[in-house]
Image: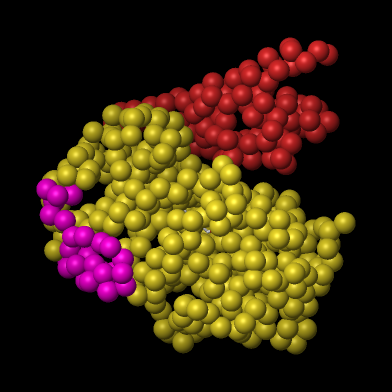
Amino acid sequence: MSRNSADVVVIGAGVVGASVAFELARAGCKNVVLIEKATPAAGSTGRCGAGVRQQFGTRHNCILAREAVRIFEKMDEYLDYRPGVEFRQSGYLMVAYSDHEWNQFKKNVELERSLDIDVKTLTPEEARGIVPFLSLDRLVGATFCQEDGHANPFHTTFAYVQAARRLGVEVQTHTSVIGIETSSDRIQAVVTDKGRISTNTVVNCAGARSGEIASMAGIDLPVYGERHQILITEPVNACMGPMVISFHHDFYCQQTPHGSFIMGVGMPGEPKSFNIRSSVEFLDEMARKLVTILPPLAELRVVRQWAGLYDRSPDAQPILGECPPVHGFYNANGFSGHGFMLAPIVGVLLSELILTGKTSIPISMLDAGRFARGELVLEPTVVG
Amino acid sequence: MSEAPNRADENTIICRCEDITLAEIRRLIAQGYHSIDEIKRVSRAGMGQCQGRTCRQLIARELANALGVKIEDVEMPTFRPPSRPVMISTIAKGEEGEGDE
Ligand SMILES: Cc1cc2nc3c(=O)[nH]c(=O)nc-3n(C[C@H](O)[C@H](O)[C@H](O)COP(=O)(O)OP(=O)(O)OC[C@H]3O[C@@H](n4cnc5c(N)ncnc54)[C@H](O)[C@@H]3O)c2cc1C
């Protein structure tokens, strides 16, 4: 028998919902139900690059990412997960191709260092010392943080889900949320295709589908899906440590612990949609950029290509916190390409907010009300 | 059935690209991973060079046995382009796959 009432219902078992559900239970919330229409990590999480970086241009992103990294570093023990989440701190190398970009990078480094994030600026030759394949053509400079890295998105999500279950969270898979009941300005229940769960608190972690969930509660939330494509090559010997990322080319590339390279480029003019078809144009674009940035890697064979959705918000920043006018309706979505890396700390903060009304790190500037107030948060350092 | 042949069975490599044994697949099914996609995500079975050409059927048979359903009723994963490994530098054309999320 599934539960028909809950203290908190978390919608979506991607990495974000799994983290939120776990942290709520860990903080002592007794009756948490996590609802997933497919299986854990079946959404964007299972399709993502799973990169984790602390190099950002805004203070809040640097701090959130730094705290998330601290959790990733101890995650296997924290969640008592035997297979391990494969977190590797193999670094992020951010490469600049114009003076304008380089000036921004230098500002970022100043900010990052003031927040205890260990980032270096490198000349093109020094960058090549770290990634010997890097083409020097038009490269102006680079920044490098060894503590950045990546993890396995499936294992990370499964680790949170299993730990949450052990703490008494009920995980309902193959169950879709189809309605949210409110009375005046309060949440009353979540309706699924399997039944009704009465509750006063809902956390919307439905990724690119978060707009749909919000509208069930009568809320207009500007989160939409945007396709991003990615590919993976045959595995080869370990030969590239860090993630290489170029905002100028809208490009990233990383070797996984398995030996495969995964890489993606943004495609200009991608419309709002739930389309996750792979396209031929992406392969062409990817090949073209790879040859200019990391030429020798173009000799690798692609074994698989796929696409997933960014859960885009208007300013490409997350939407976190309670969402007036409906009391008890919380968002943790709109991550726009950074939801994997932020998930561990987002779970902690949402749990604090729901259970105590306060957060240990300020997140009020990331509320849903900022769009109406015209207070967009502008992060200069994002891909896509 | 005697013990010995069963144990030998369990050492059979099901996914040759990623070196995954029957025992491993059975353990995952017992842990509650009940579709080919879920098993793929947790173990990498079917993610290698051949993209699941051989192991998919074998895993489907194991799932059908364990869950007591017909093999046709085991959900098949989406097959993703490119269907043959192709060198990035020689990419000229691909294939469309999947649909909406
Ligand atoms: C190609 C690509 C590369 C990326 N690379 C990175 C990266 O390197 N680093 C990084 O940090 N981020 C990256 N991202 C972004 C990252 O994938 C997302 O921000 C993150 O996975 C969001 O997690 P989530 O749990 O919010 O969403 P999801 O994983 O999408 O989870 C939402 C869940 O909600 C479920 N759901 C939806 N509607 C309903 C409903 N009505 N009822 C019940 N359940 C429902 C879905 O099935 C889904 O499982 C990338 C994304 C893509 C597409």
Question: The chain coloured yellow carries which letter?
Answer: A
In the foreground, B16 or A102: B16
Most common secondary structure along the magenta stretch: helix
A281 inside magenta stretch: no
- The x, y position of residue B18, in whole percent, is 52, 27
The reply, left or right, for residue A47 in relation to residue A159 is left
Q: Colour of chain B?
A: red
Q: Is residue B68 above or below residue A103?
A: above
The picture quadrant where one finds residue B84 is top left
State the extent of the magenta-drawn residues as a range. A100-127
Furthest residue in direction right, as rendered: A1
Query: Is there any visible trace of residue A44 in the rendered image?
Result: no
In the foreground, A205 or A118: A118
A116 inside magenta stretch: yes
Task: Specify how the rendered protein is coloured.
Answer: by chain
Q: Which quarter of the rendered image does ligand 1 occupy?
A: bottom right
Query: Is there any visible trace of residue B26 in the rendered image?
Result: yes
Quick one: quadrant of the N terminus of chain B?
Answer: top right
What residue lies at 17% left-to-right and 63% top-to-bottom? A102
- The x, y position of residue A109, in whole percent, is 24, 67
